[in-house]
Image (cartoon, rainbow, N blue to C red):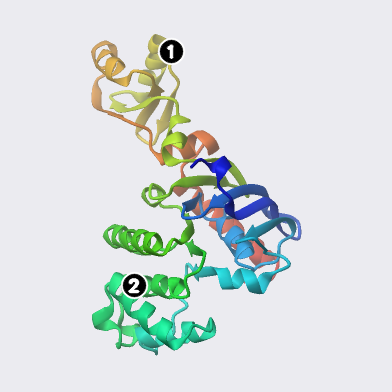
Amino acid sequence: MNDTQRSPIINVKNLTRKFKDFTAVNAVSFDVFEGEIFGFLGPNGAGKTTTINMLSTLLKISGGEATINGKSVSRERTAVRKSIGLVFQESTLDEDLTARENLRFHAEFYGLQKDLYASRSEELLSIVDLSDRADEVVKNFSGGMKRRLEIARGILHHPKVLFLDEPTIGLDPQTRSAMWQYIRKVAKQNNITVFMTTHYLNEAEYCDRIAVMDKGKIVALDTPNNLKKLVGGDIITLATSDNVMAKKEIETRFHVEVRQDEDKLVAVVENGNELLPTIIKELPQNVLSIELKEPTLDDVFIKLTGSKIREQEVSNVEKTKRFLRKRGRM
């Protein structure tokens, strides 16, 4: 079934959030369909968390409209909250309670019947591999265990949509990979739509579709594979004995655009397998290293915004901090 035949579980039209003279989210529009893993990819400060906070009713909408499960985020906040689960960047677990007690408290908050809570909590604890630690206080858990428990808690009341805001931030790559196995397994078993933000490019690969967000706007929205096609070809990365002259030589001889990336040269080309040996053979400068690869989401982001996500993170975070200090909120 294609998107034109499906009804969106999340519908967003011209969603905007302003903080006085600063526009954090600038008239974004998109749909999310039931059962999707939908991702927001972008640097810190791009507006990803602000968007989630508006959709989850934690932050007032400045303009536009959004619905979740047919309910207005602005006018039917209680109904929306019953339809969603949340996992924040920072842990919100009560670390003096056990894993089981954290789940029980959440079940009581959502009015889950005892027998339903009992069956679901045991099932979820098993799925996230915490059954043997269920009666241990959370402060003894590792970061990865806490994250797994938060995901189990967020799904306990069977929400229509699970919001994950940088769900694996601060975790090592191996733990992040394991976390995504849990998320995908739980979401599939319970037909839950996952809406997640990340600036980890490998995490974005798990998404069915990705919205690339930069400076409060969505600059592209498609499947990971289709986004990669925007780059326009294969990518050759090389280092030479004289990168300045090599850049000029490649652009002149082979009529391709070359950019400098730290101590490497990068060119997007068609038929990379044919061009690569010719470059090695004909380039006057000594080729110290050369690599041919298919486009990645990092390459997509560079094409769309002109820089890498990791290059923008520090600057955007600092801008946000300066803005909040100026407003007396830090």
Residue 127: % across, % down: 30, 70
Amino acid under disc 1: His
Task: Give the image quarter of residue 23.
Answer: bottom right
Of marks 2 and 1, the one in the foreground: 2
Residue closest to the eye, 325 or 32? 32
Which quadrant: the C terminus? bottom right
Please state the total of marks drawn on the protein image. Answer: 2
Residue closest to the eye, 164 or 122? 122
Badge 1, how many Cα within 10 Å: few under 14, some, many 20+?
A: few
Return the mark for residue 255. Answer: 1
User: Is residue 128 something that shows in the picture?
Assistant: no
Residue 33: % across, % down: 53, 51
Q: Is residue 144 above or below residue 103?
A: above
Task: Give the image quarter of residue 245.
Answer: top left
User: Is residue 49 something that shows in the picture?
Assistant: yes
Badge 2, how many Cα within 10 Å: few under 14, some, many 20+?
A: some
Return the mark for residue 209. Answer: none
Q: Secondary structure at mark 2?
A: helix
Task: Give the image quarter of residue 174.
Answer: bottom left
Q: Which residue is mark 2?
A: 143
Q: Secondary structure at mark 1?
A: loop
Amino acid under disc 2: Gly
Q: Earlier in the sequence, mark 2 or mark 1?
A: 2
Q: Is residue 308 above or below residue 261?
A: below
Task: Give the residue at x 45% y 21%.
Answer: 257
Left or right of 28 on screen, residue 224: left
Q: Is residue 93 above or below residue 328?
A: below
Question: How far separated are the C-alphas under marks 2 and 1?
Answer: 50 Å
Task: Give the residue at x 50% y 54%.
Answer: 314
| Residues marked 2 and 1 touching at CB (< 8 Å) | no
Task: Give the residue at x 33% y 87%.
Answer: 137
